[in-house]
Protein backbone atom coordinates (compact mmCIF):
# COMPACT_ATOMS: atom_id res chain seq x y z
CA UNK A 1 0.00 0.00 0.00
CA UNK A 2 1.19 3.50 -0.74
CA UNK A 3 1.56 6.00 2.07
CA UNK A 4 -1.81 7.77 2.51
CA UNK A 5 -0.20 10.55 4.56
CA UNK A 6 1.23 13.71 2.98
CA UNK A 7 4.75 15.00 3.50
CA UNK A 8 5.13 18.23 5.46
CA UNK A 9 5.76 21.23 3.22
CA UNK A 10 8.36 22.70 5.59
CA UNK A 11 10.06 22.15 8.93
CA UNK A 12 7.67 24.68 10.45
CA UNK A 13 4.67 22.76 9.09
CA UNK A 14 6.16 19.50 10.38
CA UNK A 15 6.64 20.88 13.89
CA UNK A 16 3.74 23.31 14.20
CA UNK A 17 1.32 22.60 11.36
CA UNK A 18 -2.10 20.98 11.56
CA UNK A 19 -1.47 18.26 8.96
CA UNK A 20 -0.53 14.76 10.11
CA UNK A 21 2.62 13.99 8.11
CA UNK A 22 4.28 11.04 9.88
CA UNK A 23 7.92 10.41 9.01
CA UNK A 24 8.31 6.69 8.44
CA UNK A 25 11.84 5.26 8.48
CA UNK A 26 13.65 3.66 5.52
CA UNK A 27 11.66 0.46 6.17
CA UNK A 28 8.35 2.33 6.06
CA UNK A 29 7.87 2.09 9.84
CA UNK A 30 7.26 4.46 12.73
CA UNK A 31 7.76 3.69 16.42
CA UNK A 32 4.57 3.49 18.50
CA UNK A 33 4.61 3.82 22.28
CA UNK A 34 1.40 2.55 23.85
CA UNK A 35 0.24 3.64 27.30
CA UNK A 36 -2.79 2.86 29.44
CA UNK A 37 -5.20 5.79 29.11
CA UNK A 38 -6.31 5.55 32.75
CA UNK A 39 -2.95 5.64 34.52
CA UNK A 40 -0.22 6.38 31.95
CA UNK A 41 1.54 3.03 32.41
CA UNK A 42 3.68 2.14 29.40
CA UNK A 43 2.19 -1.05 28.03
CA UNK A 44 4.32 -1.72 24.98
CA UNK A 45 6.49 -0.32 22.21
CA UNK A 46 5.81 -1.58 18.71
CA UNK A 47 6.08 -0.51 15.07
CA UNK A 48 3.47 0.74 12.64
CA UNK A 49 3.51 1.07 8.89
CA UNK A 50 1.23 3.57 7.15
CA UNK A 51 -1.61 1.04 6.92
CA UNK A 52 -1.40 0.19 10.64
CA UNK A 53 -1.52 3.87 11.55
CA UNK A 54 -4.40 4.53 9.17
CA UNK A 55 -6.38 1.55 10.53
CA UNK A 56 -5.69 2.56 14.13
CA UNK A 57 -7.00 6.06 13.52
CA UNK A 58 -10.06 4.94 11.56
CA UNK A 59 -11.14 1.88 13.60
CA UNK A 60 -10.08 3.28 17.00
CA UNK A 61 -8.39 -0.08 17.73
CA UNK A 62 -4.60 -0.43 17.76
CA UNK A 63 -2.98 -2.07 14.75
CA UNK A 64 0.75 -2.68 14.42
CA UNK A 65 3.26 -4.08 11.95
CA UNK A 66 5.25 -7.15 12.97
CA UNK A 67 8.85 -6.82 11.83
CA UNK A 68 9.53 -10.52 12.49
CA UNK A 69 6.47 -11.78 10.58
CA UNK A 70 6.45 -8.89 8.10
CA UNK A 71 2.70 -8.48 8.47
CA UNK A 72 0.04 -6.18 9.79
CA UNK A 73 -1.68 -7.27 13.00
CA UNK A 74 -4.63 -6.04 15.03
CA UNK A 75 -3.71 -6.13 18.71
CA UNK A 76 -5.92 -8.61 20.51
CA UNK A 77 -7.22 -10.42 17.43
CA UNK A 78 -6.23 -13.75 18.98
CA UNK A 79 -5.61 -12.86 22.65
CA UNK A 80 -8.69 -10.71 23.24
CA UNK A 81 -6.39 -7.90 24.44
CA UNK A 82 -7.83 -5.42 21.95
CA UNK A 83 -6.56 -1.91 22.59
CA UNK A 84 -9.34 0.65 22.34
CA UNK A 85 -7.81 3.95 21.21
CA UNK A 86 -8.63 6.93 23.40
CA UNK A 87 -6.09 9.37 21.99
CA UNK A 88 -3.26 9.38 19.46
CA UNK A 89 -0.41 11.86 19.64
CA UNK A 90 2.68 12.38 17.53
CA UNK A 91 5.99 13.85 18.65
CA UNK A 92 7.44 17.18 17.51
CA UNK A 93 9.15 15.88 14.37
CA UNK A 94 6.42 13.33 13.61
CA UNK A 95 8.56 10.20 13.85
CA UNK A 96 7.07 8.60 16.99
CA UNK A 97 3.40 7.93 17.73
CA UNK A 98 1.98 7.81 21.26
CA UNK A 99 -1.21 5.82 21.71
CA UNK A 100 -3.34 6.14 24.82
CA UNK A 101 -5.50 3.02 24.99
CA UNK A 102 -7.85 1.06 27.21
CA UNK A 103 -6.93 -2.63 27.02
CA UNK A 104 -9.84 -5.02 26.65
CA UNK A 105 -10.06 -8.72 27.56
CA UNK A 106 -7.90 -9.55 30.56
CA UNK A 107 -6.43 -6.03 30.52
CA UNK A 108 -2.97 -7.22 29.55
CA UNK A 109 -0.78 -6.07 26.72
CA UNK A 110 2.17 -8.49 26.58
CA UNK A 111 2.19 -11.76 24.66
CA UNK A 112 3.80 -13.37 27.75
CA UNK A 113 0.62 -12.76 29.75
CA UNK A 114 2.02 -9.78 31.67
CA UNK A 115 0.03 -6.57 31.99
CA UNK A 116 2.87 -4.59 30.41
CA UNK A 117 5.78 -5.67 28.22
CA UNK A 118 8.01 -3.86 30.76
CA UNK A 119 7.62 -6.38 33.59
CA UNK A 120 11.34 -6.88 34.34
CA UNK A 121 13.72 -4.63 36.25
CA UNK A 122 17.46 -4.66 35.65
CA UNK A 123 19.21 -5.12 39.00
CA UNK A 124 22.98 -5.62 39.17
CA UNK A 125 22.99 -6.87 35.57
CA UNK A 126 20.24 -9.43 36.15
CA UNK A 127 16.56 -9.33 35.20
CA UNK A 128 14.00 -9.49 38.00
CA UNK A 129 10.27 -9.82 37.29
CA UNK A 130 8.11 -7.14 38.92
CA UNK A 131 4.58 -5.87 38.42
Image: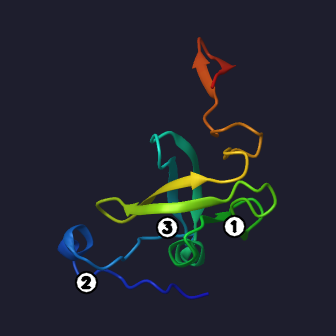
Picture quarter containing residue 64?
bottom right
Q: Where does label 1 land, which residue?
A: 74
**In the shown orientation, is residue 118 left or right of residue 4?**
right
Which quarter of the rendered picture does the C terminus lie within?
top right
Task: Specify whether 30 is left or right of 68.
Answer: left
The residue at the point 76 percent across, 56 percent down is 80
The label shown at residue 25 is 3
Gap in angstroms between the C-alphas marked 1 and 3: 21 Å
- What is the spatial separation of the Cα atoms under label 3 and label 2, in whole angstroms? 18 Å
* Residue farthest toward the top in the current orientation of the protein: 124
Q: Residues within 10 Å of mark 2 (few under 14, many from 20)?
A: few
Is residue 118 or residue 35 the one in the foreground?
A: 35
Sequence-wise first label, 1 or 3: 3
| CB contact under 8 Å: marks 2 and 1 | no
Image coords of residue 81 (percent x, y): 71, 54
For disc 1, the neighbor class at 10 Å (few under 14, some 14 to 19, many from 20) is some
Residue where numbered disc 2 is placed: 9
Q: Is residue 72 above or below residue 126?
A: below
Return the disc, 2 or 1, that comes first in the chain's sequence: 2
- Mark 3 lies on a secondary structure that is loop
Q: Quadrant of residue 52?
A: bottom right
* Rendering colour mode: rainbow
Amino acid sequence: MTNPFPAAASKHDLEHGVVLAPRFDENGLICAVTTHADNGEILMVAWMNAEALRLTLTTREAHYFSRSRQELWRKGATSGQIQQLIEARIDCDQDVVLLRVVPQGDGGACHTGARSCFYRVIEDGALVERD
